[in-house]
Image (cartoon, rainbow, N blue to C red):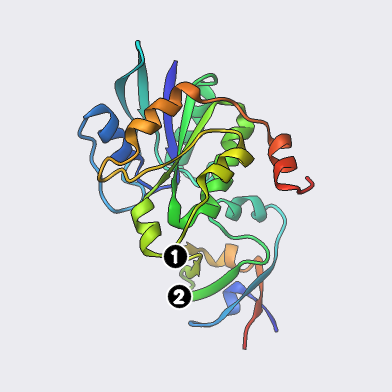
Amino acid sequence: MEKKLSEMKYGEKGIVKSINGKLRDQVAGMGIRVNKKIKITSKQPINGPVVVTIDESSISLGRGVAGNIVVEVEK
Amino acid sequence: MNILLMGHPNVGKSVVFNRITGANVSESNYSGTTVDYAKGYVRVGHKEMELIDVPGTFSLEPKDKAEEVAVKMLNENKDSVVICVIDSTKIERGLYLALEIIEMGNPVVIALNMQDVAEDKNIQINVEKLQKILGVPVVSTIAVSGKGMKELMFSVKKATSSNIKDIVENVGGNQ
């Protein structure tokens, strides 16, 4: 099932399917690219950032950014 | 000619800087400790070179003030050697920045820092192969203990500019 990163819940894992346009270069430096495994480490309340784990490093992303990344969620 | 220390936040650039220059720039285990930059001097062979500790940056497209400083410094020092410090445990994203710097045309040396941590995590890196692919010197280092610092400074003398096209060819990919 495909979901936006911002819609994923705490603990969910998956593989990055697509990243919207301009954002691709912006997040590439942080190690986020298509076909990478990703895991939601935490989600801060009141539209706060989403913290994800990629390659054992945590990265926090604003909801705006997270809304533009589509992930194939593992069951 | 200058030497620039570049890399992601929290990979140990300032520790390398202190090791090489004997200075005492603040180090801490938080990303973004260096927002301003520090300068020091080192003797390479018979030349005295200026070593600059650049704030950490994820890529060469600045997203905040510290990154802006970093990119500006790279642009202002066109012919300087860049020591690209990479966290060996997060090598993939580190190489992304390294490639961006290589693309700028500066002579580059890559320091694969935190080798000890990588070993603990059972990450093995084929330094020679990486060196062949990238066409620039690659040195394994442990900045906190000082391992590899001498080799690193030796390779600064050997630093060359590499070419992205050759790198792509070396890995057998297409652009």
Question: What amino acid is at disc 1?
Answer: Ser
Image: B98 above or below A19:
above
Image: A35 above or below B35:
below
Q: Quadrant of the N terminus of chain B?
A: top left
Q: Is there CB contact under 8 Å for labels 1 and 2? A: yes
User: Would residue A8 appear left or right of B163 to someone viewing this image?
Assistant: left
Residue B116 visible (yes or no): yes
**Location of residue B79 in the rendering, given as x and y in whole percent from the top left corner:** 53, 19
**Location of residue B168 in the rendering, given as x and y in whole percent from the top left corner:** 72, 42
Residue at image coords 61%, 30%: B104
Residue B60 visible (yes or no): no
Residue at image coords 29%, 23%: B40
**Location of residue A73 in the rendering, given as x and y in whole percent from the top left corner:** 64, 81
**Marked residue chain, label 2:** A
Q: Residue furthest top?
A: B46
Question: What amino acid is at disc 2?
Answer: Thr
SS category of the residue bearing label 1: strand
Q: Quadrant of the C terminus of chain B?
A: top right
Q: Nearer the viewer, residue B52 or B140?
A: B140
User: Would residue B79 appear left or right of B17 to someone viewing this image?
Assistant: right
Residue assigned mark 1: A58
Q: CA distance from mark 1 to mark 2?
A: 8 Å
**Marked residue chain, label 1:** A
User: Would residue B104 appear left or right of B73 to someone viewing this image?
Assistant: right
> To which quarter of the image does residue B146 belong?
top left
**Location of residue B109 in the rendering, given as x and y in whole percent from the top left corner:** 49, 33
Residue assigned mark 2: A41
Q: Residue furthest bottom?
A: A75
